Image (cartoon, rainbow, N blue to C red):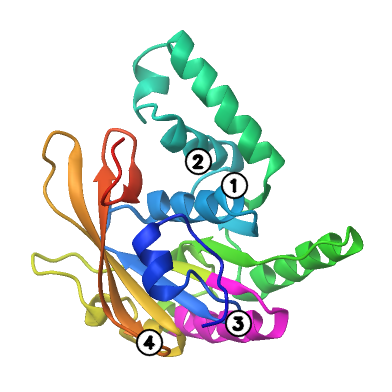
Amino acid sequence: MKKGIYTGLKEFDLKLGGLHKKELVLIGARPSQGKTAMAARILYGACVENGAAGLAFSLEMDKSRFLNRLAYLKAKIPVSKPRSGPLTTQEEERLAKELSLISNAQIFVNDTTGLEAEEICAKTRETIKDLKEKGRALDLMLIDYAQLIRGPVPPKTAIYIYDAAIALKALAVELDICVVLFSQMSRGDSPPALSDFRPESLSEYADKVFIIRRDRNINSVLNAVLSVAKNNNGLTGDIDLKFFSEYAAFENASDKY
């Protein structure tokens, strides 16, 4: 298997060889189940822990909040802390360390709202051009999340999200990068499945499709699963993780936090 872009999620990297260039990867979850937390974890793992260069389109959260999210989850600072009270000296030290690591990594965040798929593609090309002039290259691009990609007016949501997926798959091949597209899934009581993507056809052009599932909260630690619902190049099944709700952080199932 060709060497991939490692994420720091050990079982994911072992079973799938990480993320792979020229692929469109779709990651879905029901509302409030951790799309942004997973985006932050993958970006941190790939860029800070494994030296990749990553571009994130944060269509819901501004750049400062998004980068702070990365730092807080690895500094083990509760997500409620900025509003509930001042940081301790130890927390400030851990946060400063993580912010330094992030600032020195090849992480690029675009927080422009209301972008169309064509604009996302154009801005990605601009980033690659800038990096090439510095003798560097882009490895992956993430979008949080599909339903916030702007479409025509009046919007035909299902059509433009589907068209966006086609454009992003073509972009991944053209630019030799991995594109990771996060998506909301419809609400429901049963375990989420491919049919819960909106639109359902969104997964058609993806090379791999993952679905985030979390169990009920037990002492702020949840068993979580990243289900491989589709894989054009290999295995399907479940990748076991833990979700530490206090820090909004996904980590390896074997890790203590």
Q: Identify the residue under disc 2.
A: 70
Q: Identify the residue under disc 4.
A: 234
Q: Nearer the viewer, residue 186 or 172?
A: 172
Q: Is most of the magenta stretch helix, strand or loop?
A: helix
Q: Is residue 105 magenta?
A: no
Q: Identify the residue under disc 3.
A: 22
Residue type marked 4: Gly
Q: Identify the residue under disc 1.
A: 48
26 over 115 or under it: above or below = below
Q: Is residue 166 magenta?
A: yes
Say if mark 4 contacts mark 2, CB within 8 Å: no
Judge whether residue 113 can be spotted in this image. Answer: no
Q: Nearer the viewer, residue 81 or 147?
A: 81
Mark 4–mark 3 Cα distance, whole angstroms, equals: 16 Å
- At a point 64% along the width and 85% down the height, the residue shown is 173
Q: Tag 4, which secondary structure?
A: loop
Q: Tag 3, which secondary structure?
A: loop
Mark 3–mark 1 Cα distance, whole angstroms, equals: 22 Å
Name the spot of residue 192 as percent of width and height, x first.
19, 71
- At a point 53% along the width and 42% down the height, the residue shown is 66
Q: Tag 2, which secondary structure?
A: helix
Residue type marked 1: Val
162 over 210 or under it: above or below = below
In front of the other: label 4 or label 3? 4
Q: Which residues are magenta?
A: 159-179
